[in-house]
Amino acid sequence: MASNNEYYGYAKLPGKECDAEKIRLDFNGHVDAESKGTKLGGFSLRMFVAKKGIKDDQPEIGVTLRPEEWLDLIDAMKEEFEAAQIVRKQFDDLQNGEGSQ
């Protein structure tokens, strides 16, 4: 079952204005059933702008990741989060006067 998550973002198409919208992010796993057994085949990740009344003509991008790629993506996102937290703490320290000593 796919997730249904909406986030604020934007859609930019060539030759068009940047359109600030709610972006829907869907992701789901694929289980492959074979005679030898079942395995996790990968994950799909889709982003699109869900406009009311428009079904077939909406900007969409999708990617399918192998399980290893999915985990690598999660690890890369965690690294970026941790790096941003370090920068945030540095700014907090500057604002609190801890960086001027």
Image (cartoon, rainbow, N blue to C red):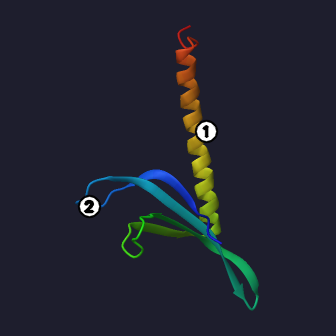
Determine whether 57 is above or below 92 in the image.
Answer: below
Query: Which residue is tagged 2?
Result: 14
**Residue lying farthest to the left in this orientation:** 15
Q: Position of residue 63 (x, y in %)?
A: 50, 68
What type is the residue that disc 1 sits on? Glu
Q: Position of residue 94 (x, y in %)?
A: 53, 17
**Residue lying farthest to the top in this orientation:** 101
* x 56%, y 65%: residue: 26
Q: Residue 88, located in which quarter of the rendered image?
A: top right
Mark 2: few/some/many CA within 10 Å (<14, 14-19, 20+): few
Question: Which disc is residue 82 wearing?
Answer: 1
Determine whether 81 is above or below 101 in the image.
Answer: below
Q: Position of residue 22 (x, y in %)?
A: 46, 55
Q: Does dot 1 land on a helix, a strand or a loop?
A: helix
Label 2, label 1: how many angstroms apart (C-alpha)? 33 Å
Q: Is residue 54 left or right of residue 99?
A: left
Determine whether 7 is above or below 87 in the image.
Answer: below
